[in-house]
Image (cartoon, rainbow, N blue to C red):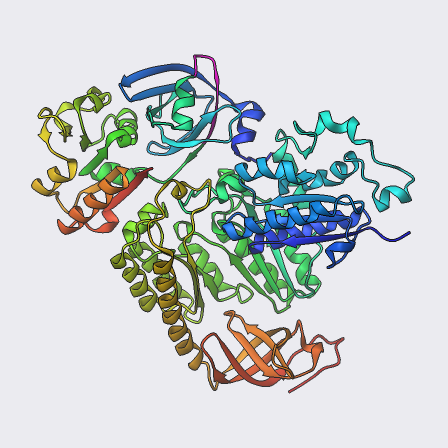
Amino acid sequence: METLRTSQQTYVKGLTHHVQHLRQISPTAYVLRVDRKGLSFDPGQYINVGPHGSIAMREYSVYSGAEEDFLEILVKEVDGGVVSGALKRLAPGDPVALEGPFGFFVIEPAQREKGKLLFIASGTGISPFHCFAKSYPELDYRVLHGVRTSAELYDREVFDRSRFVSCLSREEKGDYHGRVTDYLREHPVDPESLCYLCGNCDMIYEAFDILRSQGVPSEHLFAEVYF
Amino acid sequence: MRPMKYSLLQLGCQMNQSDGERLRTVIESLGYEPTENEEEANLLGIVACSVRQKAIDKVYSKIHKWNTAKGERNLLTFVTGCILPADKVKFLKLFDLVFHMNELPDFPDLVRQYGVVTPVGLDQGGVGRPIDDVKQSVGPSGRGVVGEESRKDRLKGYWLIPPTYTSGFEAFVPIQNGCDKFCTFCAVPYTRGREVSRPSRDILREVETLVEEGYKSITLLGQNVNSYGLDKNGEEIGFAELLRRIGEMGNASGREFWVYFTSPHPKDMSIEVLETIAEYPCLARQIHLPIQSGDDKVLIRMNRNYRVGEYRQIVGNIRRLLPEATLFTDIIVGFTGESEEQFENTRSIMRELQYNMAYIAIYSPRPGAASSRWDDDVSHEEKKRRLHELQGELQAISHEHNMAMIGKSYRVLVTGRDRLSGYLSGRTEGKVIVRFPSTDERLIGEFVEVVITEAAEMAVAGELGGVRVAADREAVYS
């Protein structure tokens, strides 16, 4: 049999996923957990998720680890957002349309062993790094998480404290007061580092220029833009 | 009785053209005859394209016109092809039938269920069911919508439909459908669904049949043609192996033909693919490798998943392994947020990589594509300026390539009469357009030798040097 993974077919063919749990993680973000149904993915990949029966779907990096028997996504609530609003209204047991996985924002085995991995995130862009940390407990990494307030430091305890740097732009708390790109300017990166960037496009563009100016070759820069 | 006729409007890419060839087979199996005159057609259909808004606007324009003729004659309308979900909802109110191309095998049933008496049905003494009988089974509006539940099997069925080739010497062979790449400017993943590879045995059979029938140019088609097989998780051969098997078939056939493929994604353009092309003469030395932008940050925003440096490496491999190959590309100018500096990087890579041809498009947001949620913040005037500047670059580079052809002899596949009276035109293996003086239309569909004598920006001209034709044809030149 051939495989055709259209959104419609996924749920019509009995691969509809169901909500297990919805956890409000900040005033404006939540983690949606659904049953896994054997879906296989590489940490860092994303899935398309939407309300069952709707044509609207959005891309979300998988938040949960590769070995867990459920799938989680971290959802930022968008004002007037069709999908983020509809998903939030789901109750345990409700069906969810899901397709994937997709994307190439993964760490190849050779890169995992090489070390000097630097993860740079803004906001919910922490999601794939959360998945990396859960999936690869032995990974040698550092993560910089840029957010506005400490309330947006989603599940930071998942990361080894010594590897995690919080950058808060609107609170004088955390490890650094300022934007994550300010931190990068003040703390130059080893050009040998493999840098993974995930978050909004402005942050990625700015970080990209900073890292290039610090001698990191573009082949060492991997990006996943959130829209 | 006057024969029932159909007219088909095909919009968009070669994939749609290929889809149209299978669609024609199904329609004609119902007894309809083709006509170019819409006003005498009883069945009017569109193979739609969602890549550009202009193509979608044309669909709306056509159906409004066709619907005004509804009361005047027995007329059934349909739309298929690349349709975004949002457009599909609107089309359901305008067309009698809306279906996904995968559902083509069900088209005869849909037509009959709609209550239409087809010519074949008449011959068999049958009539279609009244429309009231089928409303429950064809969709919420009572219009013909095929259910989604068995698309997988239907896609298989779709590929088994023999195409009604529109040429006797050039053919398109779909090998893969859909896209998993999700470039942010593109709506194809939302219109055609995920990547699905056609079974290799079917592809090889179709190619072999075409070769046996004397086809000279065969193009393997797919949205990401070189991702072939990846969706099968090892249960199907990969693209390089598919090419190798076609190459072996070509060697064994003793026939001369060229096999192309389009459109590949740089991410999956492996060295094995290039080595295979280098090994077999029937695999054409022409590579279409869309770059889209010459700026790393724009590529990130486009979600292209390669850097300019990686792309440059692939081109280096092409130049090394296939030094005689021509190189084509696709470029988008004025993508959301594209700065002047980023545009200049694209201009720079064009100069560096010396493309023979570039299909340069002005960015326009497509509903459904991720970039449609962003500000389209480069003005139309600025986009046009960038387009013209790159076209100027392309013309200069292409002219230089073409000048280098002067005095040399090239194998040319004659494709038809030229616009200039007294001339035929064709193309080289590298798809350079060639014009030469001749009125011998028996040469159309044949290979000839042409010595290039003149070069223009996008084409060359020459003199017929020699002709090698099949033994059963009369024309022999030397």
Residue at position x 43%, y 69% from top? B356
Residue B161 visible in image: no
Name the residue: 85% across, 46% down.
B119
- Residue B274 image position (x, y, % from top left): 44, 59
Per the rendered image, the range of residues in magenta is A90-99
B92 vs A19, left or right, is right
The answer to whether residue A200 is left or right of residue A8 is left
Residue B139 vs residue A179: left or right? Answer: right
Q: Say which quarter of the image contains residue B17.
A: bottom right
Picture residue at 16% right of the left edge, 36% below the top: A180
Q: Nearer the viewer, residue B387 or A99?
A: B387
Q: x, y percentage for residue B12?
A: 56, 54
**B40 sits left or right of B217 in the view:** right
In depth, the one of A78 and A181 nearer the eye is: A78
At which x and y percent is residue B32? 80, 50
In the current view of this chain or complex, which residue is farthest to the top? Answer: A92
The reply to whether residue B104 is in sight is: yes
> Could you tell me how many numbered marks the image carries?
0
Nearest the eye: B206 or B372? B372
Above-or-below relation of A67 to B392: above
Residue positioned 39% across, 43% down in the render: B371
Residue A215 position in % (x across, y down): 14, 51
Q: Quadrant of the C terminus of chain B?
A: bottom right
Q: Is residue B71 magenta?
A: no
The quarter of the picture where residue B398 lies is: bottom left
In this view, B439 is above or below B429: below
**Vertical arrangement, residue A130 with respect to residue B342, above or below:** above
